[in-house]
Image (tube, rainbow, N blue to C red):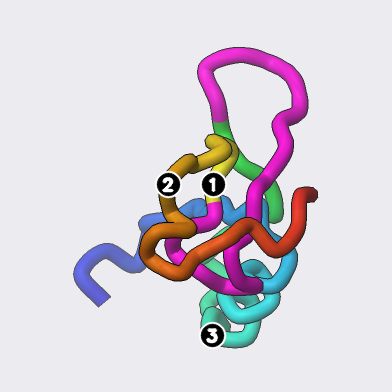
Amino acid sequence: SINPELTVHCFEPSSDTFKLLKASVSKESVKLNQCGLSDSPGELQLYKFDSTAGTNSVYKREGFFLMGLEVNSKF
């Protein structure tokens, strides 16, 4: 409502989180992209702790098991 000419681009590599994002966005001015961004070309592995966890990352985070979190899958 502040700037109706504005286009917002959202990037989300996790398929589960992307589905939630897609279901919550209805404006045509918001462009959804099911991918991540980097400063170099290529593909990276996504380590998922939970389908929509904020801890999902392209970095294999060590030590999270101490907090009860473990990587459930790799994509």
User: Which residue in the protein does label 1 denote?
Assistant: 57
- Give the residue furthest to the left: 2
Residue 6 vertical placement versus 60 (above, below): below
Residue 60 appearing in the image:
yes
Residue at x-position 61% and y-position 80%: 20
Disc 1 packing (10 Å; few <14; some 14–19; many ≥20): some
Q: Amino acid at mark 2?
A: Gly
Secondary structure beneath label 2: loop
Q: Which mark is residue 24?
A: 3
The picture places residue 28, in percent across and down from the top left corner, at 58, 71
Marks 1/2: CA–CA distance: 14 Å
Residue 49 vertical placement versus 39 (above, below): below
Marks 1/3: CA–CA distance: 22 Å
Membership of 71 in magenta stretch: no
Q: Amino acid at mark 1?
A: Ser
Q: Is residue 74 left or right of residue 21?
A: right
Disc 2 packing (10 Å; few <14; some 14–19; many ≥20): few
Q: Is residue 61 left or right of residue 52?
A: left
Query: What range of the chain is rendered magenta?
Result: 38-56
- Give the residue furthest to the top: 40
Q: Nearer the viewer, residue 63 or 58?
A: 63
Contact? badges 1 and 3 (CB < 8 Å): no
Q: Amino acid at mark 3?
A: Ser
User: Which residue in the protein does label 2 denote?
Assistant: 63
Residue at x-position 56% and y-position 83%: 26
